[in-house]
Amino acid sequence: MMKRRMRFDIWTFVLIAAWVILIALLIWPLSSVLHASLIDNETGAFSLTHYVQIATIKAYQRAIGNTLLAGFGGMAGALILGVTLAFVTTRFHIYGRALIQTLAVVALVSPPFIGAYAWIVLFGASGVVRKGLATIGISIPPLYGAAGVILVFAFKFFPHVFLITSGALAAINRSVEEAAESLGVSPTKRLFTITFPLILPAISASALLTFVLSIADFGTPRIIGRDFNVLATEAFNLYGSEVGGNPGMASALSIVLIILSMIVVFGQRWVLRKNVYHSNLIKKPERKRAHGLKALGLHVLAYAIVLIGALPAIIVVLFSFRRTSGPVFQPGLSLQSYERVISTVSDPIWNTLIFSSIAVVAIVITGTLIGYLISRRPGIATGALDALLMVPYVVPGIVMGIAFITRFNEPPLALTGTGLIIIMAVFVRRLPYSARSVAAALKQVGPNLEDAAVSLGYSPGKAFLKVTVPLIVPGIMAGALMSFVTAMNELSSSLVLYVGSTITMPVRIYLSVMDGEYGTASALSTILLTMTVAAVYAAFHLSGRKESALL
Amino acid sequence: MADLKIQGLAKSYKDVRVLESIDLDIASGEFFTLLGPSGCGKTTLLRTIAGFQHQDRGEIVVNGERIDHKPAHKRDIGMVFQDYAIFPHLTVAENVAFGLKARALPKSEIEARVAESLKMVRLDGYQNRLPAEMSGGQQQRIGLARAMAIRPTLLLMDEPLSNLDAKLRIELREDIRDIQRRLGITTIYVTHDQEEALAVSDRICVMNKGNVEQIGTPFEIYRKPLRKFAASFVGTMNFLPGRIEGGRLIVGTQSAASPANESGPVEVAIRPENVQLSLGHADSEAIALKGEVLKVTFLGREAHYTLKTEVGEVVAQVADPEHDFIEMEGRPVEVRLPLSKIVLFRSNGDVIGAGQA
Ligand SMILES: Nc1ncnc2c1ncn2[C@@H]1O[C@H](COP(=O)(O)OP(=O)(O)OP(=O)(O)O)[C@@H](O)[C@H]1O
Ligand SMILES: [Mg+2]
């Protein structure tokens, strides 16, 4: 074999920098979790006892089974809802598309924890909707247990699927679909034989994401699951409880959770192994105008999905204006809750804004560069980087937080209690969002375009900035949007890392719910929601993509 | 102004050899055409010269200087892409100006060149359109204008006219040729259209399966093919089985004095326009076969007769057919293959020297 020359350019530098970042912020902290899972709590000696227990104790096995059930269930539900919505809105003329997108964003940013609480308010044992239906003779079971958890996951996570796949659907070369049509393939068949395979990267990426989000979520199973225990809740209990805490066991459960997720990660890799470029962005698909019953049906479908998804957020907003007396809601409206929030808790608002802005800027820059490396410079070092980048996806926030506390506690890296440690945790946790979404967008931009720019005299770096970046702006924006939204709403890692002066809004909301201050929690959630939606729209407005906020 | 030398160039994708060992020597200002069947490695060769991918072996030398290790953007090699590679986010004018901006030319110069290039490809007036609003052929012409505008030292064109109508193709190929001559840009041109290749090239390189089969002027390629592949790939060629024995060339039951002093089985090749049809007398300078007209194909300025002979079918060309040519079908004719016009190949595909016109 010929010896290949090593070519040192800007991308080699990016590759090295990416590795340094991931080793410092990912491998090094997480090694502490692996370490903790492998030592005996009492003696401190090396031991596999925690893993042996997981393999032998019934409760843990059930937790593993439930985790898989919740993961695949949530994933399937979110895929069905998300792909349907994406297809309907990109291929048909739907009135109020901006409204649909807004509601999808609202569903996406449904503040953590309180979302589950809102579902209970509506569909719990004494839920408003259930009672209302009961008076007219319709009885539905309360929303508890496995089915409830899966349903909530589906409506909580479908916006991710919607965002990722509608970008891909809008970018399919129209000629390809038309070719299929001309070959006599019926529209429905074409959908499954051409369209879906073409957006398989996007579908499988969002499937993976929703699976991982579903199995790492502990708030929903905790509130709605009742005795539906999953690995995340078990691990959280073992980390969190003052009595009966078992850090070794919690670490081992976290490791099992990470391994389960990694299996799915490699499954997605396998599905995509033959993935190729689609090189022509020139002919974009058009939106068809549907008529009569079909149009009505499509509208009902689209609006039903986003409205149900946004329901918890809507409930929370409504509740924030209710009069309260202590933890109890009273009849009548009032701004009481807001007054209390403004007078006592404005710090979290600033902290949230500052932390997430810094994190997102860092994420977008790093993620775009890494996304490019992954899709355009295949090699062993980039392949490994790509695989490693899946780890933050699958590590529950609590675990990441504890790993950071363990590793960045002593000089020269005594960062605990600073805002920086919260930013770093959010950065590494959400970096994959940006990198993946850029890599996915790049898959649809033919590499020839960049070659053309190079042949016209632009250096590879400049060609990237002048040609590729403008073309993948939708992908960059989608990644930025997701990382920003999730950074603003980051609860689990911050919950472990915050101190009094660095408390963020999601943490404040969580504490309020725990203290029973639902009014304050609702008001805070509403503020957070408003801030998130405003930020999203500002970002899209500034980037000049007014015609459509998200696609 | 630049000459290009390529020596022993080889390139594989994973374990598939796409370029075996290419040697080319292209003079400054030459219009050099690559002709070859689909998948023979033409695009790969161009991309390697442009520097988008690195060769496994071999040298690329421009003006006496090896450029192999120069990054692509410093090579000053323009390229027209087979799939156009038009920037979809830029207008037509911005696409064409793109490379000029990298060269930091004054604004007025950029405008002038954009206008000139667009005019050349007949797209003046489309300056502010986006590529999505253009037809396939128009997009292709943007790519052509974009590459010509920078006046590179070396211009690579990968089927730049493949998507245009016949008339525009002829117009544009003449224009490309004129500008190329005027500016003296050394050009490598890829086309599937043989007539185009013969019409515009200074020299043609016939490629097959990653190898160079023959390099020569259009006349040499057409009239003096060195290998059977080039003979069969360029233009239409009749091949008939034959044999040389005792100084005679034997085709079927007929024979004539052999133009070559070898012996053994040969393939007799002749172009349709050189096949003569007559209804009478024999001629010692030709092989005369008895034939019958099987089919007549009208091609416009000529007609092709497909003739059945004892050694197989032969296509003959008749210039300027009259309206009654169709009545020829089924008629017996004598098919004469003038010795001065036939080319003989050994069974390994090599031409047998001497004897050709
Ligand atoms: N990226 C690649 N990976 C693997 N094989 C490739 C790749 N690109 C091209 N090939 C193969 O290399 C061979 C030469 O391809 P190339 O594109 O150079 O052909 P070409 O002569 O330009 O054909 P055409 O006239 O159809 O454009 C083909 O057999 C093709 O299948
Ligand atoms: Mg080609």
Image (cartoon, rainbow, N blue to C red):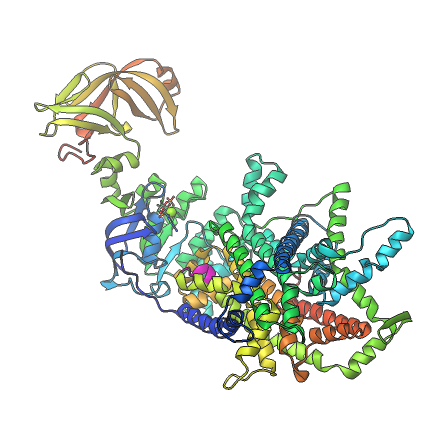
Foreground: A338 or B171? A338
Q: Quadrant of residue B53?
A: bottom left
Which stretch is magenta? A374-379
The x and y percentages for residue A426 are 59, 72
> Could you tell me which residue is drawn at 22 percent across and 14 percent down?
B280
In reply to whether residue A547 is colored magenta, the answer given is no
Foreground: A69 or A540? A69
| Residue A220 visible at all | yes
Q: Quadrant of the C terminus of chain A?
A: bottom right
> Could you tell me which residue is drawn at 19 percent across and 34 percent down?
B348
The x and y percentages for residue A412 are 49, 86
The x and y percentages for residue A173 are 55, 48
| Residue A97 visible at all | no
- Residue furthest bottom as drawn: A411
- Residue furthest front as drawn: A43
Q: Quadrant of the N terminus of chain A?
A: bottom left
Foreground: A379 or A105? A379
Q: Is residue A396 above or below residue B143?
A: below
The x and y percentages for residue A496 are 63, 76
In reply to whether residue A378 is colored magenta, the answer given is yes
Q: Is residue A494 left or right of residue A387?
A: right
Give the mark count: 0
> Could you tell me which residue is drawn at 61 percent across and 69 percent down?
A397
Q: Is residue B46 above or below residue A356?
A: above
